[in-house]
């Protein structure tokens, strides 16, 4: 127990001495040992690396997981040292809903079959996203997290220890300076008052005090130099950290490029599938309300079968007879090859230029395209309109 009390008293004395030295430095009443310029640059570079690494790490987390609730859940699992349960991506959930809806509507219907195609594509997009998240977490987020929680904590601990060693060194310098001043003052007083019985013991005490202060200063200087060397080596290791983070960043870019490439590939395939079947999608006769409810009994077309076209509709289907408007024609670049589903459509070749325009009452997803003497409906999604 006596040892613990003595150690506690010693630690309290050291803490008080450091607090006094720190306060006097802030008030400009004590000298402060300055580090060399190279060391200060290393400290500044380390602080900059820590701050920006932390910002990049946090924002990457937001990019990979926009849901703050999910991020909090993952943080709690990490603190509890438990594995995060697998969570389906939004694309996988949407794809599953579309596939279930297609079963209800009937996979043989146009809407149901399209839901199956889109749902399957969404599930593949969700799978690609899951793989991208896992790869990015391992190759990019984990190294950044290890630096912040491992290397940087070690650097911070050694920097705090170096600051304490510096305060101890400056406190020893201040005590030695005071002891020297007291010794000099006593020597001057001894010369003016030749009382050897009183001045000789006092001078001996002051000399011993100055010797003790010099010894403490040498010890403090040795500890400070040793701690400064340890801290310097850790700070110089920041260069290796930059190299490691550079490699991790390149891996993150590769994973991101592969993810977007897969998504682009899946969407192109889905566009081709939907484009090839768009010509087969027609509104059912039972739902074509506007074409039958407003007919007059005297209209000859009212007595035609529902699945037959009226004379007016027959004229509208003759795409060759549609005249371009006087203004409103534009040039368009074809993005993908397109095969016409019937005679009313125009086949397209990728990268060719055609003239397009629209006519009143036409579906917004289609335009009329012209290439030389050829004319026909073309899908808007296959074109890039040029100004």
Image (cartoon, rainbow, N blue to C red):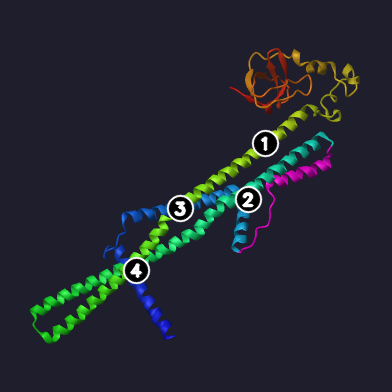
Q: Which residue is mark 2?
A: 134
Quadrant (top left, top right, bottom left, bottom right) of the C terminus: top right
CA gap between label 4 and label 3 equals 27 Å
Task: Give the number of callouts.
Answer: 4
Determine the CA span between mark 2 and mark 1: 20 Å
Between 129 and 139, the residue placed more toward the observer is 139
Q: Quadrant of residue 185?
A: bottom left
Residue for badge 1: 265
Residue 144 in the image: state x and y as whole percent: 52, 53
- Above/below status of 135 relative to 186: above
Mark 3 is surrounded, within 10 Å at the Cα level, by few (under 14), some (14 to 19) or many (20 or more) other residues, namely few
Which stretch appears magenta? 80-107
Work out whether residue 66 can be spotted. Answer: no
Label 2 with label 4: CB-CB less than 8 Å: no
Q: Are marks 1 and 4 in contact (CB under 8 Å)?
A: no
Nearer to me, 154 or 14: 154
Q: Quadrant of the N terminus?
A: bottom left
Residue position marked by numbered label 3 in the rendering: 240
Image marks 3 and 2: residues in contact by CB distance under 8 Å: no
Q: Residues within 10 Å of mark 2 (few under 14, many from 20)?
A: few
Name the front one of labels 3 and 2. 3
Q: Real-space Cα distance between discs 3 and 2?
A: 25 Å
Which is more foreground, mark 2 or mark 4? Answer: 4
Quadrant in the picture for residue 303 = top right
First-in-chain label (3 vs 2)? 2
Q: Nearer the viewer, mark 1 or mark 3?
A: 3
**Residue occupied by mark 4:** 223
Give the CA separation, mark 1 to mark 4.
63 Å
Q: Earlier in the sequence, mark 2 or mark 4?
A: 2
């Amino acid at each position: 127990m006596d040892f613990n009390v003595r150690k506690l008293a010693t630690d309290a004395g050291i803490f008080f001495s450091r607090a006094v030295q720190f306060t006097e430095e802030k008030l400009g009443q004590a000298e402060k040992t300055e580090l060399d310029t190279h060391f200060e640059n290393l400290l500044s570079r380390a602080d900059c690396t820590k701050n920006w690494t932390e910002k990049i790490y946090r924002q990457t987390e937001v990019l990979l997981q926009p849901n703050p609730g999910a991020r909090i859940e993952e943080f709690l699992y990490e603190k509890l040292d438990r594995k995060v349960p697998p969570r389906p991506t939004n694309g996988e959930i949407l794809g599953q809903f579309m596939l279930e809806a297609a079963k209800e509507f009937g996979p043989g219907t146009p809407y149901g079959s399209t839901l199956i195609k889109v749902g399957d594509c969404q599930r593949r997009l969700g799978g690609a996203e899951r793989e991208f998240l896992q790869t990015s977490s391992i190759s990019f987020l984990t190294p950044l997290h290890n630096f912040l929680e491992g290397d940087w904590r070690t650097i911070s601990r050694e920097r705090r220890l170096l600051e304490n060693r510096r305060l101890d060194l400056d406190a020893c310098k201040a005590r030695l300076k005071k002891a020297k001043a007291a010794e000099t003052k006593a020597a001057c007083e001894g010369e003016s008052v030749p009382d050897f019985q009183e001045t000789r013991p006092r001078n001996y005490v002051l000399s011993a005090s100055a010797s003790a202060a010099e010894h403490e200063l040498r010890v403090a200087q040795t500890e400070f130099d040793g701690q400064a060397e340890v801290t310097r080596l850790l700070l110089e290791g920041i260069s290796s950290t930059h190299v490691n983070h550079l490699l991790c960043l390149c891996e993150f870019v590769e994973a991101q490029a592969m993810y977007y490439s897969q998504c682009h590939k899946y969407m192109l395939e889905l566009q081709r599938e939907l484009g090839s079947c768009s010509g087969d999608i027609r509104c059912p006769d039972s739902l074509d309300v506007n074409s039958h409810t407003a007919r007059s009994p005297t209209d000859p077309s009212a007595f035609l079968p529902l699945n037959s076209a009226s004379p007016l509709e027959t004229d509208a289907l003759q795409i060759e007879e549609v005249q371009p408007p006087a203004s409103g024609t534009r040039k368009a670049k074809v993005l993908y090859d397109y095969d016409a589903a019937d005679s009313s459509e125009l086949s397209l070749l990728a990268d060719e230029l055609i003239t397009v325009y629209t006519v009143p009452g036409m579906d917004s997803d289609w335009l009329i395209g012209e290439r030389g003497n050829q004319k026909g409906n073309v899908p808007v999604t296959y074109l890039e309109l040029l100004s």
